[in-house]
Amino acid sequence: MNRLSPLLKRSFFRMLAWLPLLGLLFLWGSRGSAASCQYWIAPPPTGNDANSGSASAPWATLEHASETVPDNGCTIWVEPGVYNGNE
């Protein structure tokens, strides 16, 4: 039993050494999915609801974004500016 105990200790510490790497891989994987689910809104003339909603082609209205974006943890970024409720 004495010989088994050091072997179990080494195995346990080797397993613990992998935990930070596994945690980083998990965070990296979840970051990628969140990053692909980001949309932007900007006031006209930059924003247009016919755009794709990307940072370079933002939508114009929150209403359009709320109707278009899936409800699965996506982020909608609202650029500063003056928004007219009729647009």
Image (tube, rainbow, N blue to C red):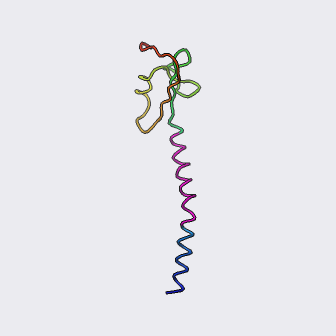
Q: Position of residue 27 (x, y in %)?
A: 53, 49
Residue at horizontal 56 percent and vertical 58 percent from the top? 20
Residue displayed at 56% across by 24% down: 57
Quadrant in which the C terminus appears? top left
| Image side of residue 74 versus residue 3, left or right | left
How many numbered marks, from 0 up? 0
Q: Position of residue 51 (x, y in %)?
A: 53, 22
> Magenta region, mostly helix, strand or loop?
helix
- Tell me if residue 30 is in the magenta stretch: yes
**Closer to the camera in the image, 24 or 82:** 82
Which residue occupies the foreground of this view, 10 or 67? 10
Q: Position of residue 36 (x, y in %)?
A: 53, 38
Residue 33 sits inside the magenta stretch: yes
Above or below, 81 relative to 55: above
Q: Residue at x 55, y 73 (%)?
A: 11
Task: Tell me where residue 62 sits by quadrant.
Answer: top left
Residue 50 location (% of width, % of height) = 50, 20
**In the image, 72: left or right of 18?**
left
Relative to 75, residue 85 above or below? above
Q: Nearer the viewer, residue 31 or 83?
A: 83
Give the extent of the magenta segment. 16-34
Establish if 75 lies above or below 78. Answer: below
